[in-house]
Image (cartoon, grey):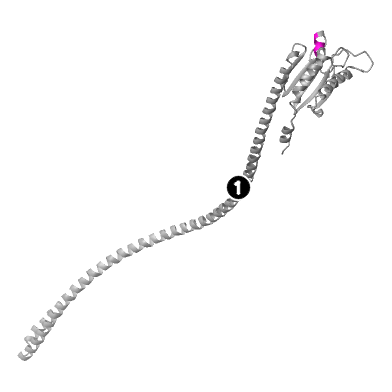
Amino acid sequence: MTKKLLILTLVVFTFNSCVSSKLYKELEGKYTNLKNDYDSLNADSDSILSDKNALQNQYDQLQNEYDATLLERNQLQQDLTGLQKKHDVLNDSYTALEQNSSKAIADNVQKNRELLAQLNAKELALAAENDRLLKLEADMQERSQRIAELETLIASKDQAMRDLKDAISKALTAFEGKGLTVEQRDGKVYVSMENKLLFKSGSWAVGSEGRQAIEQLGSVLAENPDIAVLIEGHTDNDPFSSGGQIANNWDLSTKRATAIVQILNENEAIKPESLTAAGRGEFAPIATNETTQGKAKNRRIEVVLTPKLDEITKLLNND
């Protein structure tokens, strides 16, 4: 623009010397107009340049912001890509976990069902066991009561037998030292009388003193009707050889036992059904048969007194 203005000025000076005054003024007017246009254009150019610089600054600022935004976007894109990968990994893990969890849950459900079935079986078994225990407890209580009743009965029988022994001992005091003994063992009372108190050798007839002893014994037995009376005849091992009505020692022992029963049976207070006679011969000795004293002890009558156990038997059989 400045170059064009100089050329124009040169042209004006050149024509100034050649043209007329009127033309000069016209040219000078045009110059002035041109100069004013130039100044105006120059001012517009400065304004435009200023605007351009401002716009350039704005552009640069926007470019910087764009670049920063682009970097941030790229970083976010990278972050998004990384997060997407992590999401895919987590999703795969979740899917696998879900599958495993479903299997684990199914397994646990099956195990729980099995455990529940076992528990139900245990509960049924426990209920049955409780019922059995209750029944056993009731049975034990019943048996305990029966045992207590038995113990009471046995104690009562034992006491009755002790009282009987004492009564017999007292009744037969006069015959002490004459081969008569009274003892209690195994719940029974044993009255043992040697043959010298009752019989002559080889005889089954009871002598007067022996009869008196048997009658005294009978008076005590008459007061104890619940006693079973077993009379056993015993001999030594010497063979019986007198012949006649006696075949052997067994026969003799039986006849002697029967003779005692006959005397006791004379007492009407004694029930005949409570009396039993038995011959044992020489087969139940209480002493040696090698001596005279031993043989004398073996030749005897034993009266075995046993309490009747009907009540006890009934209680034992009451199942």
Q: Left of 137 or right of it: where is 302? A: right
Q: Left of 1 or right of it: where is 91? A: right
- Residue at the spot x=38%, y=62% of the render? 77
Q: Quadrant of the N terminus?
A: bottom left
* Placement of 105 over or under 1, stated as above or below: above
Range of the magenta residues?
A: 293-297
Residue 288 in sight here: no
Q: Is residue 295 magenta?
A: yes
* Placement of 319 over or under 33, stated as above or below: above
Instruction: Label 1: state its secondary structure.
Output: helix
* Placement of 292 over or under 76, stated as above or below: above
Q: Which residue is mark 1?
A: 123
- Give the main secondary structure of the magenta stretch: helix
Residue 307 in percent (x, y) is at 74, 27
Residue 218 in percent (x, y) is at 78, 22
Nearest the camera: 139 or 275? Answer: 275
Q: Quadrant of the C terminus?
A: top right
